[in-house]
Structure formats: C-alpha cells, structure tokens
Image (tube, rainbow, N blue to C red):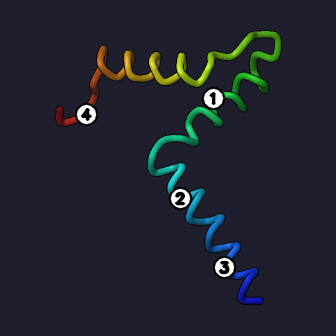
Amino acid sequence: MATDLAARAWRWLVWFARGLTGEARYDAYLAHERACHPGREPMTEREFWRDRYRAQDADPGSRCC
C-alpha cells in the first residue's frame, strides 16, 4: 500500500514538473498533429521549440520582459 502511494505521488510529481517546465507542450502538439493532420509530418522537438520561442519573441503579449 505504501509502495502504491509512493508510485502515485511520483507519477503526479513528474506530471506536475513536465507541466511546469512546459515539456508537456510538445506532447500536446504531437497529439494535435496526429488527430487533426494525420498525413503531415510533425516538427521535431527542436523545430517545435525554436518555432515557439520565435513566436514569443515576435509577439511577447503580456510578458514583462
């Protein structure tokens, strides 16, 4: 029982950290590409992050810096 609780806590911590750092965004992008554009080759992870940062730099929105 304690092992199960520890495993659940670890999975939650990993899930939380991936969301906090933004790492889960690429997974969401891949899921979207598979669902909405099945014939299109998705960007690599490197291309995805470069495109995302380029878009943020072009339109910073409500960021402070």
Mark before the other along the chain sequence, 2 or 1: 2
- Quadrant for the C terminus in the image: top left
Going from N to C along the chain, the mark reached first, 1 or 4, is 1
Q: Are marks 1 and 4 in contact (CB under 8 Å)?
A: no
Residue designated by label 4: 62
* Residue position marked by numbered label 1 in the rendering: 29
Q: On the rendered structure, is 27 left or right of 65? A: right
Residue placed under numbered mark 3 in the picture: 6
Q: Secondary structure at mark 4?
A: loop
Amino acid type, mark 1:
Tyr
Identity, as a three-letter code, of the amino acid under mark 4: Ser
Residue depicted at x 65% and y 36%: 27
Q: Residue 6: give x, y in percent of width and height.
A: 66, 79
At a point 70% along the width and 73% down the height, the residue shown is 7
Q: Secondary structure at mark 2?
A: helix
Q: Which mark is residue 16?
A: 2
- Answer with the quarter of the image where residue 54 lies: top left
> Which quarter of the picture shows residue 45?
top right
User: CB of mark 3 within 8 Å of CB of mark 4?
Assistant: no
- Circle 3 packing at 10 Å, graded few (<14), some (14-19), many (20+), is few
Q: Nearer the viewer, residue 45 or 40?
A: 45
Residue at x-position 45% and y-position 18%: 50
Q: Amino acid at mark 3?
A: Ala
Alpha carbons under labels 1 and 3: distance apart: 30 Å
Mark pair 4, 2: CA separation = 24 Å
